[in-house]
Image: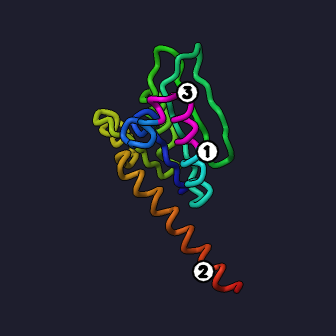
C-alpha cells in the first residue's frame, strides 16, 4: 500500500512557532515555508504528501508542486476539513493514509474512515527525524567515497 500524508495546512501553521510567525507577516510566506518543508520530506522519504488549505476562491483549486507534493485550496464556503475527509473516504482502501491535524473533530472523522492521525507537533518530529536520517545517509556516503 502506498503511503500518503495529508496535512491540514492551517492547523500546522498555527501550531509551529516559526510558521505562525511567518503567518503574522504574510500568509503566503507561511504557506510557502510549509510547502518547502513538506516537499523536502516527500523527496527524502518517498511519501506522497497532500497539503490542504482553506481557500476563498470560486472553486476548489489543486496545484501539483511535484510528483510528491500536491496542494489543495478549498473553494469559498468549503473547509479544508471537507476536502481532507473526502480524500480519506475515497482513498483509504487503497492507500495507507496519515492525517496531520490538531483539529479534534477532524481527527475523529478521518479515523472513522480508516486513516491514522498525528498531531502537528508529531508531524514536526516526523519531518525532523526524516531530515536526520538523510543527513546520516549522506555522511555515510561521504565516508564510503572518501
- The outermost residue toward the front is 25
- SS type, badge 3: strand
Is 104 on the left-hand or right-hand side of 76? left
- Disc 2 versus disc 1: distance between alpha carbons? 27 Å
User: In this rendering, is residue 2 above or below 145?
Assistant: above
Measured as percent of width and height from the top left, residue 136 is found at 54, 74
Q: Residue 55 bears which disc, if any?
A: none
Q: Nearer the viewer, residue 63 or 115?
A: 63
Identified at 42% across, 52% down, the residue is 124
Is 19 on the left-hand or right-hand side of 65? left
Identified at 60% across, 58% down, the residue is 46
Q: Quadrant of residue 126?
A: bottom left
User: In this rendering, is residue 141 above or below 34?
Assistant: below
Q: Which residues are magenta?
A: 22-35
Tally of marks:
3
Is 63 on the left-hand or right-hand side of 91? right
Query: How many residues crowd mark 1 within 10 Å: few (<14), some (14–19), many (20+)?
Result: many
Identified at 47% across, 41% down, the residue is 7
Q: Residue 140 bears which disc, if any?
A: 2
Q: Earlier in the sequence, mark 2 or mark 1?
A: 1
- Disc 3 versus disc 1: distance between alpha carbons? 13 Å
Q: Quadrant of the C terminus?
A: bottom right
Pointers 3 and 1 in contact (CB under 8 A)?
no
Q: Is residue 1 magenta?
A: no
Q: Earlier in the sequence, mark 3 or mark 2?
A: 3
Q: Residue 69 bears which disc, if any?
A: 1
Identified at 40% across, 57% down, the residue is 125
Measured as percent of width and height from the top left, residue 38 is found at 55, 48
- SS type, badge 2: helix
Amino acid at each position: 500500500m502506498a503511503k500518503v500524508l495529508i496535512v491540514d495546512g492551517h492547523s500546522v501553521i498555527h501550531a509551529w512557532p516559526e510558521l505562525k510567525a511567518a503567518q503574522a507577516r504574510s500568509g503566503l510566506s507561511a504557506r510557502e515555508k510549509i510547502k518547502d518543508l513538506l516537499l523536502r520530506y516527500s523527496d527524502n522519504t518517498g511519501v506522497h504528501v497532500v497539503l490542504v488549505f482553506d481557500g476563498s476562491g470560486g472553486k476548489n483549486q489543486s496545484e501539483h508542486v511535484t510528483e510528491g507534493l500536491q496542494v489543495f485550496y478549498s473553494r469559498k464556503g468549503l473547509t479544508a476539513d471537507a476536502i481532507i475527509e473526502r480524500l480519506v473516504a475515497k482513498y483509504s482502501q487503497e492507500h495507507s493514509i496519515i492525517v496531520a491535524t490538531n483539529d479534534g473533530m477532524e481527527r475523529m472523522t478521518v479515523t472513522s474512515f480508516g486513516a491514522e492521525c498525528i498531531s502537528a507537533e508529531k508531524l514536526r518530529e516526523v519531518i525532523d527525524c526524516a531530515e536526520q536520517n538523510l543527513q546520516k545517509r549522506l555522511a555515510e556516503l561521504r565516508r564510503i567515497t572518501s
